[in-house]
Amino acid sequence: MRTMLDAVVIGSGPNGLTAAVELARRGMSVEVFEARDTIGGGARTEELTLPGFRHDPCSAVHPLAAGSPAFRAMPLERHGLEWLHPDLPMAHPFPDGTAAVLAHSVGETAMSFGAHDAGVYRRLVAPFTGRWDALARDFLRTQWLGLPHDPFTYARFGLVAMQPVTLLNRRFQDEKARALLAGLAAHAIAPLRGFGTSGLALMFALAAHANGWPVPRGGSQAISDALAGLLRAHGGAVHTDFEVKRLDDLPPARAYVFDTSPTALARIAGLGNAYRDVIYGPSVFKIDYALSGPVPWTAPEAHHAGTVHIGPTSDEISAALDAAVQGRDPSVPFLITAQPSLIDPTRAPEGKHTFWAYGHVPNGWTGDATDAVERQIERFAPGFRDLVLARAVAGPPQLAARNANYVGGDTATGSAAGLRLLIRPKLTRVPYETAHPAVFLCSQATPPGPGVHGMSGHHAARAVWRRLRGSSGR
């Protein structure tokens, strides 16, 4: 008879692997089971278009990973993780050929907005510059579990963070700053007038100033592979091609930790309607490109940026998000694009490039937004279509097929609109625990929510550790 494990983790995304590593580093016996033939979940790399072109099917640029308290506490560089930084973390071009930029430097960022708004931006970020570690510890967590480490900074940031970004943007006179901040807030895939969107925009801006918006050499798979390597170094194991349909499919364990959607957890663990009220948000329509050359941006700054946001006004960005939330077809999408091959030569054959872009669409949408996406790119990079060697298109059905956590194509594994960015997946004191004392949830469906940062896994591992230590007297 097989010895009972301390913990079994279902799903090998960044949060599942983080939870597994943290438990294994505490001396626990841990095994991970993944349904697909490769690990990584939303942090994978594949040849989606042509041989030699390495694409990230989901996440590609990692501002929160580079500054994650969980990842920083791990020697991931010993297991192959290397961060590469573009000259500019992000550029936001405009139709006249100019651009606002999110730079490593606060000053360079501010000066791209114009004289008046430069001062407003400097004053906005000044109280938090140099305090990334405190902000990350205090905000990348469940807000009501424990006191903040830095109460003064926490309160000061919280007063700004709770505002809608539409309110924050009233401080600025010109559209450049407004559009840039709206684009940062749009990463939540929720209406810009919602609670907490200023906090998201500010966190992304401060992450750029503190740690950049880097990409991993070789692709996002490098993050997952480094976590798995560290897990194995501490005696853990990873099993792929192992679909879990019920708990009885798994070896006996004292704890089962789910890096899945709440819906899947309830089905597999037999928890019935425990998560029946979870709301899944809008999806995205993503295109991965193999290009014969770099994107021909009209704005010079965009040629040096790892990420480029396309949406010239805050109103246009807001309208695009509202359309996705309200179930309407995209017409003029706001696009988040990335060009990792500019700084990582391993992504494409010499002289060629990889590029991806996504816009927002309704949950479960089955249409084709390729033309709408490429029309929008051509507004800021005329001749782009002439460079396309191949494209891999993924709407909500394809995204859900690639990753079962993305219900209806929701890459956030649960709506992040309003208070749902804080209360995930439902209102409960410890969101990582469930009605079953041996079953835990560690996916981005729990706080602090979407992103490759491992913090949901980190907090879930702490909940598991407390439960098992209490039951065993450890």
Image: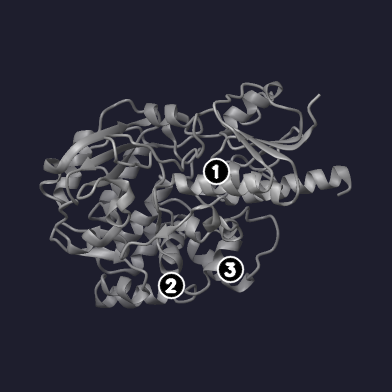
Residue under numbered circle 3: 134
- Mark 3 belongs to which amino acid? Ala
Q: Residues within 10 Å of mark 1 (few under 14, many from 20)?
A: many
Tag nearer the camera, 2 or 3: 3
Would you call the spot at circle 3 few (<14 residues within 10 Å), some (14-19), or many (20 or more)? Answer: some
Image vertical order of residue 183 relative to residue 384, above or below: below
Distance of label 2 from label 3 (alpha carbons): 14 Å
Element at badge 3? helix
Q: Earlier in the sequence, mark 2 or mark 1?
A: 2
Vertical relation: 295 (above or below) 386: below
The first of marks 3 and 1 along the sequence is 3
Of residues 424 and 277, which is closer to you in this image? 424
* Residue underneath mark 2: 125
In x, y percent, where is residue 90? Answer: 32, 60
Query: Depth-wise, is mark 2 or mark 1 nearer the camera?
Result: 1
Residue 89 x, y percent position in the rendering: 34, 62
- The residue beneath circle 1 is 444
- Spot occupied by residue 456 in the image (x, y as percentages of width and height): 60, 48
> Does residue 352 appear to the left or right of 109 in the view shown?
left
Name the image colouring. one colour
Q: Residue at x 47, y 32 (%)?
A: 403
| Residue depicted at x 44% and y 36% | 410
Per the image, label 1 sits on a secondary structure element best described as loop
Q: Vertical placement of 186 versus 257: above or below?
A: below
| Amino acid beneath label 1 | Gln
